[in-house]
Amino acid sequence: MIVVLDTSCISAFIRAGEVELLVRILEKHEIVLTEQVAHELKLSKLNDLRNFNHPKIKIRDVGSAIAEKYNIHIGEASVIMFAKENGALAVIDDKKAREAAKQEGVEFIGTATLLKLGLEKGAIKRKDADMLIEKIIDSGRLYMTEEIKKWILG
Amino acid sequence: MKNTTYIHLPEVVKEKAERLVDAGLYGNMSELIREAVRQYVEQQKMSAIDLAVELYKKEKVSLGKAAAIAGVSYDEMLDALYLRGVQPKFEPSGKKQAEKELEIAKRLLK
């Protein structure tokens, strides 16, 4: 399966210094960033985001023509279009972008779901889970409700 | 690009505006209205970043689009929301929704 990540997801793992964990969670799958999302990272003032590259995360070119239609950014639009054109699973956290993905018939999950999957698959060890997930949420600026934090760790 | 907007003015405002045109301060009514709108927009003190935050809060735009409107990077936009006490609208936000997504993840990411 190809998994295409929106900016919130990849930047959370980069900021938390946990990209290897992301790769482990999705170890059997192809991880993709669109050119537009990669460009968004390059605009950052943080070196880790600006200079990001990883041999197992591919950058792929795709259009973003639906951005205007849904009042979303070309980065978010490109993730949706890539998923639609390639039958990929999208990882999107932004509410408005998810509404657009739904309209376009794209299957998506949030980063929270990815973390839960990581815990269930054993990519995140139980004993490290509290600290690790807290770090990704806090350092990664991945805002989550208390209900979701409890759900991930539950 | 030609961009035409039709507006209805109250009679009293229209008469006053026409006097300014008749007096030669503006070439025509369109010129007067363009100038009035330009001055009004410039007077608005709202910065691009505040505007983007407001649009995001009202769910008119996504976070990425808000960053583009503000002319800042994605993570700077997150900082701007944080400084203003605005919680990003990230999902899943509830357990029920999250459980459904986990089913999708398990089905597709075997």
Image (tube, grey):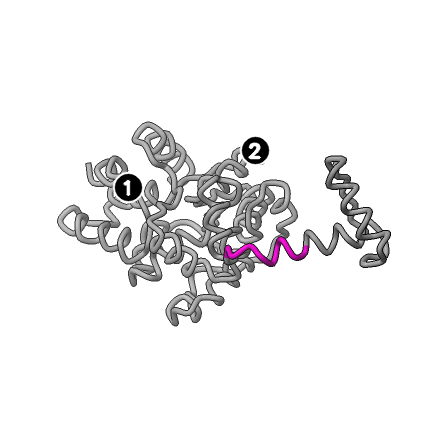
Task: Based on the picture, tell me whether residue B50 belongs to the magenta stretch.
Answer: no
Q: Amino acid at mark 2?
A: Gln
Q: Which residue is mark 1?
A: A116
Report crowding for label 2: few under 14, some 14 to 19, many 20 or more residues within 10 A (C-alpha): few
**Image coords of residue A110 (percent x, y):** 39, 42
Question: Dividing the picture into quarters, in which one does residue B6 lie?
Answer: top right
Magenta residue span: B38-46
Distance from Cα at disc 1 to Cα at disc 2: 25 Å
**Image coords of residue B107 (percent x, y):** 40, 34
Q: Which residue is mark 2?
A: A103
Q: Nearer the viewer, residue A97 or A90?
A: A97
Q: Nearer the viewer, residue A112 or A128?
A: A112
Q: Is residue A78 left or right of residue A121?
A: right
Q: Residue at x 48, y 54 (%)?
A: A32
- Residue B38's disc is none
Q: How many marks?
A: 2
Task: Based on the picture, tell me whether residue B43 belongs to the magenta stretch.
Answer: yes
Q: Label 1 is found on which chain of the structure?
A: A
Q: Residue at x 42, y 49 (%)?
A: A29
Q: Is residue B30 left or right of residue A70?
A: right
| Mark 2: secondary structure | helix
Q: Identify whether B55 is placed above or below A105.
A: below
Q: Amino acid at mark 1?
A: Lys
Q: Nearer the viewer, residue B2 or A67?
A: B2
Q: Residue at x 50, y 58 (%)?
A: B47
Secondary structure of the magenta portion, mostly? Answer: helix
In which quadrant is the N terminus of chain B drawn?
A: bottom right
Q: Identify whether A37 is placed above or below B98.
A: below
